[in-house]
Amino acid sequence: MSTCRPTKVLFGCAVVLAMAVANAAGETLDVTEYEPRMEQLQGLRTTVVGRFASMAGNRIKLVGSAIDFRLSETARPPRPGTKNVELTGAAAREGGRWVFVVAVAEAVPSDVEQFDERRRAIAERDFGQLYALSRWARTQARRYDDAELRSRAVSAFREAFAWEETALIDRGDGQGLLELADRGRELGLDQETVLRLTHLALWTERRRLEAAANWPALATLAETTSQRLPGAADRSLRLDQTTRERYLADPQAEFLAQPALRPALARAFWADLQAAVLRHAASSGTAPGKLAMQAAEQLPEFPELAREFHLADLRQQAATASALTRGKMLALGEEFERLGEAADHRQLATNWLAAQRAHLPQGDAEARLALADDYRHLLDDVETAAALYLEALELVPSLEEAASQLRSLGYEKLAGGWQRTAELRASLVEAERRRRVGGIAPGDLETAVIARLRRPDRVARTVTAAAVFEQWIYDGPPALYVYLRRLPGGREAAVVSITAPDAPASGD
């Protein structure tokens, strides 16, 4: 022990010495703690505890200590069977080596007995105190190579660990559970328990973050999951739909029940979480094209998700059809067709063509020819195409290509202009029919029939509860049968149909 010179610090040295005496008087030191401090505590009454090893004569040997403990003449030796001993006395130098003269030697509870007593005093779920007891027991077991104490230390640690896990679960603290798993790994907890706890932690944190709609944190959690759960980053792993649904409904039970499937279960957890993150990103305005590439790269097990984003991207582009080049419009249309969305393709073409037609340059017959061809090939819209060919001919009457295309659509040029052949023939047939039936038609009233023809030569009537049906017979010319319906109340009859002897009936 150092000495103090007679200077101004003499008072300070006295205070330090007094403190050392006070500490020694009230402190019980483990023998391993005492040995490094022997010189400092020389001559001071000190109490030392340790494992009793043996006794020969008046000398006591403690386990793991080289100190020469000697009983004083008045000290009684420890009783037989002593495991731990408490020795009170003072250290002194003797012939260049340390000797501890024991004034009192008493047996004290063994480390195992101390452990059991302290364990009984710890309140239920007080994992902090139980951890502290485990650490003490582990230290003592390592110091004395005590297998029984080591076993108790491990048991106490596992119990404290379980108590802490329960407390964290009750609080819904996924981050705390994840830290607990890390601590368990560092302290040598078995891999099975660490993996189970990590899985539980990640699911607990996911539920908490989803309840709070904390999507940035959920995206970070997906990254953490890919790093922490074996199998989560393996894109080749798959679960059948039934197992996947069962796992997502009760993750912990399925994870414990299916150890062989845990990598695939981890992948299902990550993929489901990542898909939710990407869908939220889509709803928040992230470019669907970017999300489509992410989904295709990261989630091959969900091809429908990549398709969903890709289709959204196509529709977003199609929404500005008027600004698209013809080449871009055609490429989008091909993609719609590839995805089986023919209706989207047709709507895109309709919108694009309408925009092109609305902005046709005045006097540009060639542009109308080209647009007419697009209407025919993209929409099979021959009516609009014909209208555009006619517009082109109005601008350039000698434009043979437009005339040729009109003919291919069934048009003929007459004195009054271009007319569709089928319509022309239909109008001629209708005119002939009307001529043959006296120019009357279904819906005409009886007064109009009489005015255009004459009164019938004969009338046949059929009476029902709802109406009177009359057949007006004209012997000719022209020879006709005119069928009319007369409603109750004496109102004028209306023509239902007309039949000529050599022509089909006309009517509704």
Image (tube, rainbow, N blue to C red):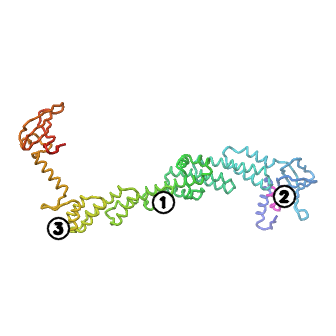
Q: Residues within 10 Å of mark 2 (few under 14, many from 20)?
A: some
The image shows residue 289 at horizontal and vertical percentages of 43, 61
User: Which mark is drawn over residue 65?
Assistant: 2
Q: What element carries label 2?
A: loop
Q: Do the residues labelled 3 and 2 touch (CB within 8 Å)?
A: no
From this view, report whether residue 218 is shown above or below residue 459: below
The numbered mark at residue 296 is 1
Q: Residues within 10 Å of mark 1 (few under 14, many from 20)?
A: some
Q: Does the magenta stretch include residue 397?
A: no
Which quadrant is the C terminus positioned in?
A: top left
Q: At numbered mark 1, what does the secondary structure look like: helix, strand or loop? A: helix
Q: Where is residue 91 in the image (x, y as percent from the top left)?
A: 86, 59
Give the class, few, some or many, for how many residues have Cα within 10 Å of label 3's Cα (few <14, many ≥20): few
Residue 310 on image: x %, y %? 42, 59
| Amino acid at dot 1 | Ala
Q: Could you tell me which quadrant the N terminus lies in?
A: bottom right
Residue 334 vs residue 484: left or right? Answer: right
Q: Distance between the residues labelled 1 and 3?
A: 55 Å
Q: Which of 441 and 206 is in front in this view?
A: 441
Write down the quadrant of residue 186 in the picture.
bottom right
Task: Tell me the distance, in whole angstroms, between the alpha carbons under discs 3 and 2.
Answer: 122 Å
Total of numbered circles in the picture?
A: 3
Question: Is residue 176 visible from the viewing direction of this image?
Answer: no
Judging by the rendered image, the residue that carries numbered circle 3 is: 397
Residue lying at 78% horizontally and 63% vertically, measured from the top left: 13
**Seen in the image, is 133 located left or right of residue 296?**
right
